[in-house]
Amino acid sequence: MISSTGKTVAEFIQLAIAPIFLLMAVATTLTVFAGRLSRIVDRGRSLEARGTPDNAAHRDELRVLERRAQLIYRALSLGVSAAILVSLLMALAFAGEIVHFNTAAPVALLFMAALFSYTGALLCLLREVFLAIGHFRLGIRTRS
């Protein structure tokens, strides 16, 4: 037989599932961001190893890579902020349950802040992808 306290904790854990799913989504997205940043850095190092940028295309590609890296860095920062906010809201919610304090408003605000931060991270990713695709060339040149 489950005591009323055990039942309350079980119900509370069930309510904590939404933030856990958000935290998992953020963690997965952070992996994507880190992978993209790694590729950008590798490409930049490869270009820089060739020596000084002697043509405009080389310099332009380095500028685009720098802008892309900045966007992904911002996305990573926002994603980590979202993860921290979700962790804080879960800790606050559990602490409130333990000490019998109404944490509904602060938890809701933290959840909304986490969603806004995650949305910002995704928008940075989207901008970085647009920038990458906008400057993508296969090296095939057609004669005009």
Image: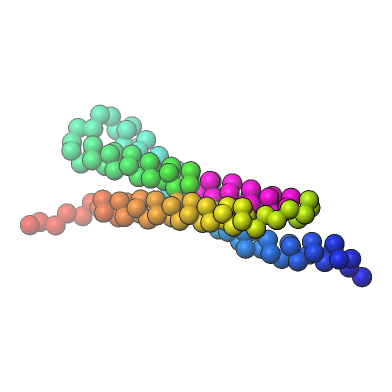
Q: Say which of 90 and 27 sits in front.
A: 90
Q: Is residue 81 magenta?
A: yes
- In the picture, which quadrant includes the C terminus? bottom left
Residue at the (82%, 66%) spot, across then down:
7
Q: Say which of 121 and 96 sits in front.
A: 96
User: As drawn, which residue projects farthest toward the left?
Assistant: 144
How many numbered discs? 0
Whole-percent x, y for residue 133 in the image: 30, 55
User: Relative to 57, is 79 on the left or the right?
Assistant: right
User: Relative to 13, is 75 on the left or the right?
Assistant: left
Q: Is residue 56 above or below residue 103?
A: above
User: Relative to 2, is 63 on the left or the right?
Assistant: left
Residue 40 in view: no
Residue at the (43%, 52%) spot, across then down:
120
Whole-percent x, y for residue 62 in the image: 29, 38
Residue at the (10%, 56%) spot, across then down:
143
Q: Is residue 52 magenta?
A: no
| Magenta stretch, overall SS | helix
Q: Is residue 71 above or below residue 49?
A: below
Q: Which residues are magenta?
A: 79-96
User: As drawn, which residue projects farthest toward the right?
Assistant: 1
Residue 100 in view: yes
- In the picture, which quadrant includes the N terminus? bottom right
Q: Which quadrant of the figure has residue 93?
A: bottom right
Q: Which quadrant of the figure has residue 70?
A: top left
Whole-percent x, y for residue 130 in the image: 31, 55
User: As drawn, which residue projects farthest toward the top?
Assistant: 52
Residue at the (62%, 59%) spot, across then down:
19
Whole-percent x, y for residue 132 in the image: 32, 51
